[in-house]
Structures are given as C-alpha cells and as structure tokens.
C-alpha cells in the first residue's frame, strides 16, 4: 500500500512538473528589459517579447520582483493576449513608484497556447 501511494504521489508530481515546464518553456523570448518613465509620469518595466512557439499564444503573463538593495519591495505584472507565431510585442509592467526600486528580476513567464 505504501509503495502504491508513493508511486501515485510521484506520478502526480511528475505530471504537475511537466505542466509547469510546458507553461514556462521556450515559448517566449524576452529582450531589452529596462525601467522607463511614461509620458504621464508612471513608472514601468519595458521590454520586447516574441512568440517563439510556432503556435498562437492565448495568454502570456510576465511577473517581476521589484528590488531595492536586493530586497523585494514590490511586484509588477504584465499580460499579452492572442500573440501569433513569430509575432513581437511590447512588455509594459506598471508599478507603484512610491518606493523606488533600483533593480528588478523577471521571476516568471506563463504562456498558454490557444
């Protein structure tokens, strides 16, 4: 019984890991990420993304940690939808600029096929 339960847990973990890897695999290339101040005074993380999957991506979510002296002080998120194979798009992740971060880290890219 214990062996059977272990096998079930291992299989569930493998399936979950495979799904997570599929969601963050090489479907999206990201480049030129930098801080940018918008015309209306907002702060954001700007960059360029490209669908490298060969299939239309229904939703792409970018998650960033905002850092000050290597301490996480906030998060920023952006999303793109219905991006065709090979298509490029801009990333604009707005954030609250009360606490000024000195750097950021892209922590996650989730992409689902349409």
Image: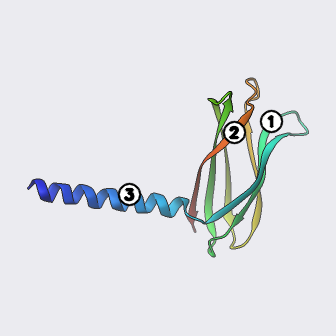
Task: Identify the residue shown where x is 64% and y is 71%.
Answer: 56
Provide residue 107's location: percent of width, then percent of height.
59, 46
| Side of 17 where 54 appears, left or right | right
Q: Quarter-wise, where is residue 76 in the image?
A: top right
Give whichever of discs 2 and 1 has the lower sequence position. 1
Assess disc 2: are there few (<14), some (14-19) or many (≥20) residues with their C-alpha within 10 Å of its C-alpha.
Answer: many
| Side of 26 where 98 appears, left or right | right
Which label sits in the foreground, 2 or 3? Answer: 2
Colour scheme in use? rainbow
Provide residue 104's location: percent of width, then percent of height.
69, 39
Task: Identify the residue shown where x is 76% and y is 28%.
Answer: 97
Residue at the left extreme of this rendering: 1
Q: Are marks 2 and 1 in contact (CB under 8 Å)?
A: no
Quadrant for the N terminus, please: bottom left
Instruction: Provide the secondary structure element on which disc 2 rests.
Output: strand
Residue at the bottom extreme of this rendering: 54
Instruction: Provide the secondary structure element on which disc 1 rests.
Output: strand
Assess disc 3: are there few (<14), some (14-19) or many (≥20) residues with their C-alpha within 10 Å of its C-alpha.
Answer: few
**Mark 2 vs mark 1, CA separation in Å:** 13 Å
Assess disc 1: are there few (<14), some (14-19) or many (≥20) residues with their C-alpha within 10 Å of its C-alpha.
Answer: some
Give whichever of discs 1 and 3 has the lower sequence position. 3
Residue indicated by mark 3: 16
Q: Are marks 1 and 3 in contact (CB under 8 Å)?
A: no
User: Considering only vertical position in the picture, is 29 above or below 44?
Assistant: below
Task: Identify the residue shown where x is 63% and y is 76%.
Answer: 54
Q: Which mark is residue 104?
A: 2
**Mark 1 vs mark 3, CA separation in Å:** 36 Å
Provide residue 36's location: percent of width, then percent of height.
84, 41
Q: Quarter-wise, where is residue 13 in the image?
A: bottom left
**Mark 2 vs mark 3, CA separation in Å:** 28 Å
Residue indicated by mark 1: 43
């Amino acid at each position: 019984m214990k062996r059977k339960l272990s096998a079930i847990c291992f299989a569930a973990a493998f399936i979950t890991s495979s799904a997570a890897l599929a969601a963050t695999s090489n479907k999206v290339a990201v480049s030129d990420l930098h801080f940018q101040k918008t015309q209306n005074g907002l702060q954001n993380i700007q960059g360029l993304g490209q669908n490298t999957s060969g299939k239309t991506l229904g939703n792409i979510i970018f998650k960033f940690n905002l850092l000050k002296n290597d301490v996480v002080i906030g998060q920023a998120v952006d999303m793109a939808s219905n991006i065709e194979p090979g298509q490029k798009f801009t990333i604009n992740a707005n954030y609250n600029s009360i606490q000024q971060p000195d750097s950021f880290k892209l922590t996650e890219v989730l992409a689902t096929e349409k």
